[in-house]
Structure formats: C-alpha cells, structure tokens
Image (tube, rainbow, N blue to C red):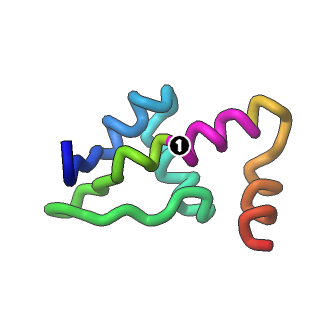
Amino acid sequence: MAGERLTIGELARRTGVATSAVRYWEQLGLLPAPSRASGQRRYPPSAAYPAGVILLLRAAGFTLRYLRELLAS
C-alpha cells in the first residue's frame, strides 16, 4: 500500500524485537528518526531492513557501540 506507515509496535513485531530496542537503536542513531503522526512514531516499511541488518550483525557478534561507530565513519 502506497504511503503505508508502521507504528513502533508494528515494526517491533515485524523484526521480532521489543519496542524499547527500536527506541534505543533510534537513540543510538542506528535507525533514522521516524516521522510522527499525532505524537506516534511512524516508520516506513523499509525501516525493517536496517533493523534486520542490526539483528544480523548482532548475531555475528558485533556490538551496538561498534555499529554506531561504523555508521559514524
């Protein structure tokens, strides 16, 4: 659906993580800050891709700190 936006809960369900993890990744700069509608975070469906990459790299043993440094460079 064109223009579809996901709430933080929907993004968390699609990626299999807690909403607090999504917020934390956003705080670290690993996920871009989403738009807001009525105060709610609204993510594009494509936000599931970087979340999946984060999960993959975490499973490979990389720390979130390292991922943040990697993105900053």
Work out which residue is located at the far bottom of the displayed protein and give it.
73
* Residue at image location 36% in from the left, 45% down from the top: 45
Image quarter where the N terminus lies is: top left
Task: Name the residue at 34% across, 53% down.
Answer: 43
Dot 1 amino acid type: Tyr
- 53 horizontally vs 12: left or right: right
Residue that lies at the very extreme toward the front in this rendered image: 2
**Residue beneath disc 1:** 49
Give x and y (percent) for residue 65.
78, 56
Q: Residue 20, how many percent across, how many down?
A: 48, 43
> Is residue 54 one of those drawn in magenta?
yes
**Which residue is drawn at the image coordinates 51% and 31% (left, top)?**
17
The local crowd at label 1, few if under 14, some if 14 to 19, many if 20 or more residues have their Cα within 10 Å, is few
Q: Where is residue 33 shown, x and y percent of the image?
A: 44, 65
Side of 3 relative to 71 (left or right): left
Residue 69 located left or right of residue 38: right
**36 up-or-down from 44: above or below:** below
Magenta residues, start to end:
49-57
Where, by quadrant of the figure, is residue 55 drawn?
Answer: top right
- Decide whether the magenta segment is chiefly helix, strand or loop: helix
Seen at 55% across and 52% down, the residue is 24
Q: Could you say where residue 41 lies in the image, as x and y percent from the top left? A: 30, 56
Viewer-nearest residue: 40 or 3: 3
